[in-house]
Image: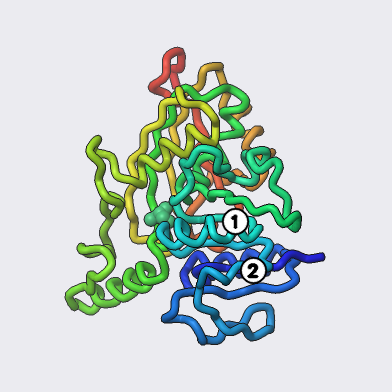
Amino acid sequence: NAPSLAVVGVTGAVGQEFLSVLSDRDFPYGSIKMLASKRSAGKQITFEDRNYTIEELTEDSFDGVDIALFSAGGSISKHFGPLAVEKGTIVVDNSSAFRMEEGVPLVIPEVNPEAMKGIKVGMGKGALIANPNCSTIICLMAATPLHRHAKVKRMVVSTYQAASGAGAAAMEELELQTREVLEGKPPTCNIFKQQYAFNLFSHNAPILSNGYNEEEMKLVKETRKIWNDMDVKVTATCIRVPVMRAHAESVNLQFEKPLLEDTAKSILKSSPGVVVIDDRASNHFPTPLEVSNKDDVAVGRIRHDVSQDGYSG
Ligand code: 2RA
C-alpha cells in the first residue's frame, strides 16, 4: 500500500517545493502530515484539492510515518531526524546536518542511487538519506557522466546563485528592494546586510579559516563523497546574484583521459536529468528564466579549454 508521508518545514520555500514535486510526479502516498514550528501549527494548507491542518513538529510526529522529507534547518534535522529513524521512518534530509557523516548516504538519484542500497520503504526499518547542497547537485548532474567516462582530475566551479537558495524571505526582499531602488527609496536590507537588487556579492555563508566560505567547501567535500574519490581536486567560488530562481554555474573540468567536445556533448545529451541548450549560431544557452520551475539541469557553452596543451583553438 502507498506509503505515509510527512513534510517537515512545510511552510518554507523547499517545503513548498517538496509538495509541488510530489504532485508533479504523482507520487503515491496513503497519507501526508504537514509539519512545521509552533508558529505555523493550526494554519490550513490545501494540497491536491484537500485541506490539511499544519501540525507542530514534536517527537511523536513520526509514529506510523514511512517517509519524512526534512527541510527545516540543520538543528531541527539533527534533533528530529534520528528520532524519526528510530520510529522506522526513512528520512530524506535536505539540511547539511548529516551529509558528511560516515555511513549516511549522500544521494543524487540520477547520479548515485546505489548509495541507497538496502534502504526499503515499508519494512519498518528506518534510515536517513542526506540530500546534497543544491549547488553540488546541479554541478554533479552534468559533471558525473563525464567523470565516469574520462575521470575528472580537477574541477573549478564558479556559481551564480539565485535568491531562492536563501529562502522565501530572500526572494521577497529582492523584489521589494528592486521596487524601492527604482522608486529612488533606500533598499530594505534585512536578510543580506547589503543591497542585493542590481548588485551581486560573495555568497552569504560564513568564511572559514582557509578563506573559503561554507558553501564553497560543501561543493568540495560533497563532490569527493559522492564520487567516492578523495583525490579529485575541486575548488569553488560561490556568488549570490540578483536572480529569483535557478542557480547557474560555470564548471571547468580537467580529465585524466582525453575527452572530445562532441563526445562530451553526446554523453550529456544522454544523461538522466540533463538537457543540452548549446546553440552557438543564435548564441542561445541556458538561462535561469528558461529553466526555472523545471527539474532538468540545462547545460551549454560546452567547449574544449583553449588554455590546455595541444589545442590551438
Ligand atoms: C544557497 N545552496 O543557495 C544554498 C542553500 N540552499 O544559499
The quarter of the image that holds ligand 1 is bottom left
Residue at screen point 46% across, 41% down: 100
Q: Amino acid at mark 2?
A: Asp
Element assignment for label 1 = helix
Image location (x, y in percent) of residue 73: 42, 61
Circle 2 residues within 10 Å: few <14, some 14–19, many ≥20: few
Q: Is residue 170 above or below residue 102?
A: below
Residue 46 visible to an observer of this rendering: yes
Image location (x, y in percent) of residue 134: 48, 51
Instruction: Using the image, tell me which numbered label, if any, was put on residue 63.
Output: 2
Q: Amino acid at mark 1?
A: Val
Circle 1 residues within 10 Å: few <14, some 14–19, many ≥20: many
Residue at screen point 64% across, 56% down: 90
| 62, 109: nearer the viewer | 62
| 75, 27: nearer the viewer | 75
Element assignment for label 2 = loop
Residue 278 visible to an observer of this rendering: no
Image location (x, y in percent) of residue 37: 45, 75
Residue of label 1: 85
**Looking at the image, which residue sits at the far top?**
310
**Looking at the image, which residue sits at the far right?**
1
Q: Which numbered disc, 2 or 1, marks the residue that appears first in the sequence?
A: 2
Task: Say if mark 2 contacts mark 1, CB within 8 Å.
Answer: no
Residue at screen point 65% across, 33% down: 267
Q: Is residue 251 above or below residue 176?
A: above
* Label 1 CB-ligand 1 distance < 8 A: no
**In this picture, residue 214 sits left or right of residue 140:** left
**In this picture, residue 50 sits left or right of residue 155:** right
Cα distance, mark 2 to mark 1? 10 Å
The C terminus is located in which quarter?
A: top left
Q: Is residue 311 above or below residue 113?
A: above
The image shows a total of numbered marks equal to: 2
